[in-house]
Image: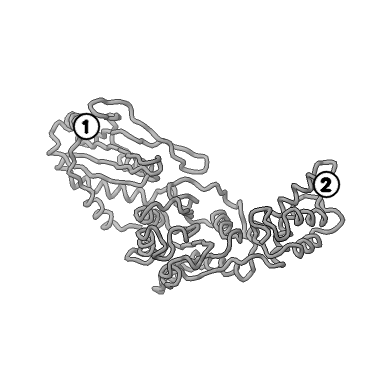
């Protein structure tokens, strides 16, 4: 978390030579009964996801002040404040001011004007909100202390801490306990290595700190599509207690977005940062259309700012495409973990898992059927095996292999017909027939 000195430094950088528009200048003159030269304004830019948080902080810190006025000034006219709705939990929503000004009155009739202004780009999540705090110049020291208390409140009370979110603050559609380690079928040594790396991050962080050792930094999971890399993210988001931020290539629009993502992760730490398809924004220099993004990633992962409470997991289908300074330098990732296509044993384990359902199996035990079907399939990924199984279920329905309660009856014959439908050596279904 930020130290008090760092917060004050940020406040001092935020002072603004503020030249309000005519309508707002008239409003400030009425509030303070003086000219703008006798006023001081601090501008506090915030990421869009923190627009509600900073407002809650202001209202909390000024809880014993009276609200005199709420208005929105546009040109020379005044109207009602505009609001926007935020998710603050799963299924819980709350309104925040999108555009408007509030006049607070405190002890000795001291006044403070808080103005929220949001500039939009292509869509609302790309908005760049700014919060302006204006008071009389003689109260400048008080204003600095107020800003520090607001920032400290936000650090202590950020309701995103411990949540599973995207960089724009939207909650992941993954519920606690929805996925488990049993859902991900991997070679046991690979699964153990992943669990060891993740658990070390949680259980040994304090021991590393006490002994001045660099903590676990993260791992790159690589392998062909469909081998479980994305599913790993879902399992971790479902199982862990810390903050989890899922970053897709669409979340990384430039170097500034990379900086914002890491700042968010540090503020909400301890955090797992999950970068999906790292090769889309961290490929080898010379093949990368946006070297500024790559450069910012390298700096954020191993620069002047400590990441002791961050654990970074990245996935890629093409490990050779990743910039060597990203994947090979020890100070950025601790481990490279390969997700391989399924061998017969893994195919058996996944089929065994899929056959645990209440479907009726005709004439043989689930284990026996799983063994036979595992031998029937070639080396395929987990995603392909799931699609193969789903196709078998649909084929069983088409062939009227159902009981009197409309439950599907599975048999080895159905799986053989499924294999024929998908084609041996022919690409009849995406991902099959290699």
Q: Earlier in the sequence, mark 2 or mark 1?
A: 1
Relative to residue 374, is residue 264 depicted above or below?
above
User: Considering the image in quadrants, where does the N terminus appear?
Assistant: bottom left
**Furthest residue toward right:** 363
Closer to the camera in the image, 189 or 133: 189
Say few, some or many: other residues with alpha carbon within 10 Å of mark 2 (under 14 / 14 to 19 / 20 or more): some
Residue 108 picture quarter: top left
Query: x, y percentage for residue 296?
Result: 35, 60
Residue 383 picture quarter: bottom right
- Secondary structure beneath label 2: loop
- Res. 375 visible in picture: yes
Closer to the camera in the image, 405 or 295: 295
Query: x, y percentage for residue 411?
Result: 82, 54
User: Considering the image in quadrants, where does the C terminus appear?
Assistant: bottom right
Q: Nearer the viewer, mark 2 or mark 1?
A: 2
- Secondary structure beneath label 1: helix
Say few, some or many: other residues with alpha carbon within 10 Å of mark 1 (under 14 / 14 to 19 / 20 or more): some
User: What residue is at 64 percent from the left and 61 percent from the top?
Assistant: 381
User: What residue is at 36 percent from the left and 48 percent from the top?
Assistant: 154
Residue at mark 1: 24
Relative to residue 117, is residue 202 depicted above or below?
below
Closer to the camera in the image, 421 or 251: 421
Relative to residue 348, is residue 102 depicted above or below?
above
- Res. 203 visible in picture: no
Residue at mark 2: 401
User: What residue is at 79 percent from the left and 58 percent from the top?
Assistant: 366
369 relative to 324 in the view: left or right: right
> Disc 2 and disc 1: Cα gap in Å?
74 Å
CB under 8 Å between callouts 2 and 1?
A: no
């Amino acid at each position: 978390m930020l130290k008090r000195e760092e917060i004050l430094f940020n406040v001092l950088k935020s002072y603004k030579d503020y030249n309000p528009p005519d309508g707002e200048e008239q409003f400030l003159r009425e509030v303070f009964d003086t000219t703008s030269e006798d006023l001081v304004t601090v501008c506090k830019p915030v990421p869009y996801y923190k627009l509600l948080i900073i407002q809650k902080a202001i209202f909390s810190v000024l809880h014993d002040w009276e609200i005199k006025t709420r208005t929105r000034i546009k040109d020379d006219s005044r109207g009602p404040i505009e609001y926007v709705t935020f998710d603050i939990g799963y299924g819980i929503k709350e309104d925040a001011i999108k555009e408007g000004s509030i006049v607070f009155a405190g002890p000795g009739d001291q006044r403070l004007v808080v103005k929220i202004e949001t500039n939009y780009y292509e869509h609302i999540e790309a908005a760049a909100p700014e919060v302006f705090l204006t008071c009389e110049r003689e109260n400048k020291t008080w204003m600095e202390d107020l800003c520090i208390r607001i920032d400290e409140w936000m650090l202590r009370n950020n309701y995103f801490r411990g949540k599973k979110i995207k960089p724009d603050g939207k909650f992941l559609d993954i519920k606690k306990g929805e996925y488990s380690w049993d859902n991900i079928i991997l070679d046991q040594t690979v699964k153990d290595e992943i669990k060891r790396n993740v658990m070390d991050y949680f259980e040994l962080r304090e021991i590393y700190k006490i002994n001045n050792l660099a903590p676990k930094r993260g791992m790159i999971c690589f392998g062909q599509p469909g081998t479980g890399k994305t599913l790993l993210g879902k399992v971790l988001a479902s199982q862990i207690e810390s903050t989890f931020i899922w970053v897709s290539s669409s979340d990384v629009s430039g170097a500034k977005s990379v900086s914002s993502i890491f700042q968010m992760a540090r503020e909400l730490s301890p955090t797992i940062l999950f970068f999906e398809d790292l090769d889309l924004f961290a490929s080898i220099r010379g093949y990368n259309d946006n070297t500024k993004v790559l450069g910012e990633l390298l700096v954020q992962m191993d620069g002047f700012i400590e990441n002791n409470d961050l654990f970074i997991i990245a996935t890629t289908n093409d490990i050779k495409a990743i910039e060597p300074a990203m994947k090979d330098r020890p100070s950025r990732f601790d481990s490279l973990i390969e997700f391989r296509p399924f061998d017969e044993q893994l195919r058996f384990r996944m089929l065994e898992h899929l056959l645990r359902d209440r479907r009726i199996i005709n004439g043989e035990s689930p284990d026996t059927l799983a063994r036979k079907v595992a031998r029937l399939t070639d080396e395929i990924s987990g995603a392909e095996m799931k699609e193969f199984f789903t196709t078998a279920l649909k084929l069983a329905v088409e062939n009227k292999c159902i009981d009197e309660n409309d439950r599907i009856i599975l048999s080895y014959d159905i799986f053989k017909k499924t294999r024929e439908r998908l084609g041996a050596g022919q690409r009849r279904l995406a991902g099959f027939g290699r």
